[in-house]
Amino acid sequence: MNKKKSHIFSFVYMGLTIIAIILILLFGTDLDEIGDALKNFNIWWLFACIAALFLYWFTDGLLLYDITAYMYKKTPLNRCVKIGVIGLYYCALTPSSTGGQPVQVMYMRRDNIPVGTATCIVGIKFVVFELSLCTIYVIGMFLRGADYYANNREAFWFAMLGFVINLAAVLVIILTIVNKKLVLRIGNWVIRMLSKIRIIKKKEKTLAHFSEVIDEYHTAASYISRYKLRAFGSYLISVINLAFMFLIPYLIYLSFGFTKYNVLDVFIMEAFLFLAVSFFPLPGAAGASEGGFMLFFGPFFGAGTAVAMLIWRFLTYYMILITGSLMVVFDEVSSMRRKKPKLADGEEQE
């Protein structure tokens, strides 16, 4: 499927999910109960949600800026923010968020950053992201794990599954430093076994791609070990970046006028939800994200859960689609204008 068809498919699919959500809201919930839940709704908290969202986008670009500074050289912050937003946009469009990194490498190449260096930069960004995500989960489990296990066991186990998958990625990255050949042997063996039972159809292509990914992670992890202090700074930026995203459900919670749960309760539950749907292989984890919110945050929002989910989904997903698509179009138009040859002096344009 080419890029144009992929985008069309993604937008059609997301349009269908919006319709499905609205139908659930209209026919699967009690409108009177929703009205009661919205009696104390304060729209000003939504502006705080938007501010948190923009800070999430900004710190994502800041993370890219920080890594680029010690891996290559300082690049204008506004360019890094633009590349970061476009990367988030393509992550939202592609299954399991696989499209963001290659597109970011392409845009960095436009800024004359060598492809190898750009690939290493986004590799380091991914490593510190995974480490910060796992750290937040471990702290959250220590602080609230027992409560969630007792009161929302389904959400607890879904989050645990997401954590195991993300932790596996971290362990593979660490193991590539210790013994890259061992990782390749194990990975190749798994791919061949899966191809024999026809789960993987293009064995040779998958093997080549796996080898490339391991090489990239090995290089990225090697640079992290070389620039330990700088990489730790990047890790802290990544933690702050995720914190802005995980804060949004609490601000929505406050907009309903609720006060029973504190910021830590809602923050950790959002981190668990993020982990739980991260492995879902559809663009934007469509379906899993909406259903997950209903499951994870039902005890928090009660009858207003469906409305809260719509607000949350629009802010955290559809806003990046709108903003990212506009940014991509604007960047393409600007790029075409820059490439347009200048007319010679005195030459008339036809």
Image (tube, grey):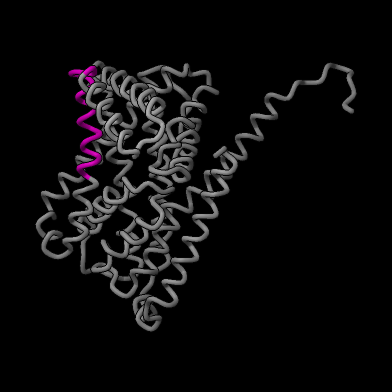
Residue at 41% across / 54% down in the picture?
286
| Position of residue 171 measured from the top left corner of the image (x, y, whole percent) | 20, 31
The percent position of residue 76, horizontal first and vertical second, equals 48, 26
| Magenta segment | 163-181
Q: Residue furthest bottom?
A: 32
Residue at 65 percent across and 32 percent down: it is: 334
Q: In the rendered image, is residue 20 in sight?
A: yes
Q: With 340 as the anchor, is 331 left or right in this view? A: left
Q: Position of residue 190 (x, y in %)?
A: 25, 31
Considering depth in this image, is 28 or 200 the residue closer to the camera? 200
Q: Is residue 62 one of those drawn in magenta?
A: no
Residue positioned 9% across, 57% down in the render: 146
Is 52 on the left-hand or right-hand side of 109? left
Residue 66 visible within the image: no
**Residue drawn at (49%, 38%) of the image:** 86
Where residue 344 sits, quadrant-wise, is top right
Is 31 left or right of 180, judged from the image as shown? right
Majority secondary structure in the magenta region: helix
The picture places residue 303, in percent across and down from the top left corner, at 32, 75
Quadrant including the N terminus? top right
| Magenta span contains residue 168 | yes
Q: Quadrant of residue 205?
A: top left
Q: Is residue 16 above or below residue 334?
A: below
Residue 17 appears left or right of 146: right
Compare residues 120 and 300 and report the one nearer the observer: 120
